[in-house]
Amino acid sequence: MIKEKSNTALTFEDFKTEVLNDYTIAITSRECSLLGRKEVLTGKAKFGIFSDGKELPQITMAKFFKNGDFRSGYYRDQTFMMAIGELTPEQLFAGLYGNTDINEEPMSAGRQMGGHFVTHSLNEDGSWKNLVQQKNSSADISPTAAQMPRLLGLAQASKIYRNITNIPNQDNFSNQGNEIAWGTIGNASTSEGVFFETINAAGVLQVPMVISIWDDEYGISVHAKHQTTKENISEILKGFQKEANTNGLEIIKVKGWDYSDLIAAYEKAEKIAREQHIPVVIHVEQLTQPQGHSSSGSHERYKSKQRLDWEKEYDCVRQMRLWMIAINIASPEELDIIDAQAKKEVVEAKKKAWTTFITPIIKEQKELVAILEKIAHASLNPKVILAHAKKLNGIKEPLKKEILVTARKANRLYTAGDEKTELVQWMKSFANKYRDAFSTKLYSESEWNVFSAKEVAPEYPEEEDIIDSDGRMIIRDNFDAIFTKYPEALIFGEDSGKIGDVNQGLEGLQEKYGEIRVADVGIREATIIGQGIGMALRGLRPIAEIQYLDYLLYAIQILSDDLATLQYRTFGKQKAPLIIRTRGHRLEGVWHSGSPMGMIINSIRGIHVLVPRNMTKAAGFYNSLMECDEPALVIECLNGYRLKEKTPINYGEFKTAIGVVETIKEGSDITLVSYGSTLRLVMEAAKELSEIGITCEVIDLQSLIPFDIKHDIVKSVMKTNRLLIIDEDVPGGASAYILQQIIEEQDAYKYLDSKPQTLSAKAHRPAYGTDGDYFSKPSIEDIYEKAYAMMHEVNPTKYPSIY
């Protein structure tokens, strides 16, 4: 790194060497961008988005990025990744081609388009690496500004580690809280709400964060005048400027083509953030986009000639070149040699990446062609088989899809025999290989996944000493045990701290464990989740509290696009075992009473969804999750905090098995399946039905994701031959998912004597008041009559129609 001028130990030769190295990285990255676009236009790659025009500030940022630091950026940071030594040109092209080998394409094994970067936080077995000894990048996502909430948590982790010193393996995750979280974002993306939410939260929390805003005045074709008030993001952020005796942020403006000023700006930002834990925004202005937004369009369509001429003049690489020549660091001829060498190396890297990518595919192509030519005679139409083989063989650069399509079409023309067996075996091997490449690691495959937590029953005192407690006290006392047992555990949310959450499930815990571990936050659900993701990425065990289930909608994009996809899109190289705590179901009124479970379970595959019926079950889920390395959403019953439950004595130890249903009432006539608060109504209906001779088997799902891993529901249906699913989501919501799992995954249709049915809420949200709940959601009478009608169909004489 270029040192301060007062450091006389830095010779001109040292200075020259470092500047030339920086230029080499910049020109190498630029050549990658130029050649990468050509690869898209020739059809070898599907899409390209590059960092051309942003090279210089990224190289400067990299100078101050230390081991242990984290980046949370966006898809134009290739130069930065090259500068910190975490991306080679060959790897960049491997990503562009979608190479599915994690060793060749370490960013995502071909699962994300190029420009999305990550470093590996985990060993092969899923255990943590020492993150302090490496430079770290959290995994990029495409949704604009969605990297900001996670950035907040990455920065907050340093604050936690600076203030809490008894966390296990703390030295693997932090050097006394001195790490900075570095964020990057394009100027247009600062119009997104989560950007402002993050800025506000960072100013309140005072965490070591440096946000670089790459400003080239455009968002694809839309100019800043349509994006930003005053056409200047740092101008409208002035109200966040930290002043004497206030919190807030430091704001620095710098021109993106000025090498010297960039170094001064980033040196100042690093010192403020790292030493004082004050967030900093660096507004990097006057940047360019030499190739436009991406490979899908040309910026000549929407930029004026004057703007295009200016961009050529103030291209940051060109300006750096002119500056080096002006101060005699290098001659034009010397720089021409660097340019030529960089271009040659990039071309060679591209060729090597393409050869590495295409060679095994061509090998598989030739294998199939040989098989088809060999076995064509045994088919129903040898000419068609040979035509398929010829067509496939004629494809110069085949896709895996084209190979498998050919095999599947050919397979249709065989009835039986050794030839068909040979083709089918080859086809299955090929499909399984790439099924693993494309469809694994959505959930943890380590020894710490959710199935590793084995059930431990709650223990109770002797019969005469058993007492009942409010559900809220059970959840509270269990959290107390968790915070004692796990120093790395912390919880935060709206009203979670001082009053101990709105239902007093955390009563008194802030006073006992302090404001760092039991914290109040503002009304900002997206960044609450982001805090949790970032802290979990750095080895902490955060519990992010969303006050009510329907407030989850504010955060669903972050949950869906970031947390849920994390292990998948990193090919299992990063994890964030965040627990999201919320409460919902059965409250009366349009708000806080929604049960959008269908939306949730279909939006956040990759996150486990747990729906305990009472607080003891919920506490058991938290205890299980603390032993695992996966994210989960726990939805407590909002109307269960004041209900009485037996008081366990083994707080922090009893565990609810994840993915296992519980039969809470046995019966032989009909299987009733439900979860959460509705189960209490189901049990009452079952009791009333038993009075007329209908015995219901009642099953508590307990978790929606994962779903009934032991297939206990189908075992019940084998006995009763009838199935009714009761759910308070809208029609076709969670009930459709539950039905699909039971009928398709468990093959329960084989054992049904009656049509499987669902009973859900109305399509609208519940109206206000007790009557609104009764007429909007399944009632005891609804459940009774639905089950009775199914039995009427079976035996109308014994069970005559009610209506």
Image: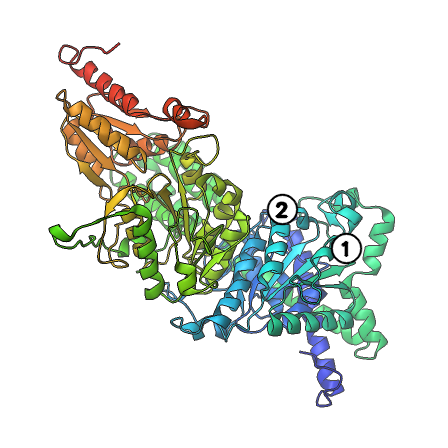
Q: Residue at x 57, y 63 (%)?
A: 71
Q: Nearer the viewer, residue 59 or 251?
A: 251
Q: Position of residue 59 (x, y in %)?
A: 67, 68
Task: State which tag comes first along the sequence, 2 or 1.
Answer: 2
- Label 2 sits on what residue type? Gly
Q: Nearer the viewer, residue 412 or 704?
A: 704
The figure's colour scheme reads rainbow
The relative height of residue 66 versus residue 579 in the rendered view (above or below) is: below
- Residue indicated by mark 2: 193
Q: Badge 2: how crowded within 10 Å, few (<14), some, or many (20+)? A: few
Q: Are marks 2 and 1 in contact (CB under 8 Å)?
A: no
| Residue 542 image position (x, y, % from top left) | 43, 58
Residue 744, picture quadrant: top left
Residue 489 visible in the shown view: no
Element type where label 2 sits in the image: helix
Give amino acid for label 1: Glu
Left or right position of 742 against 98: left
As drawn, the label of residue 490 is none
User: Could you say which disc has been placed on residue 235 in the image?
Assistant: 1
Name, please, the residue furthest toward the bottom: 9
SS under mark 1: helix
Residue 686, image quadrant: top left
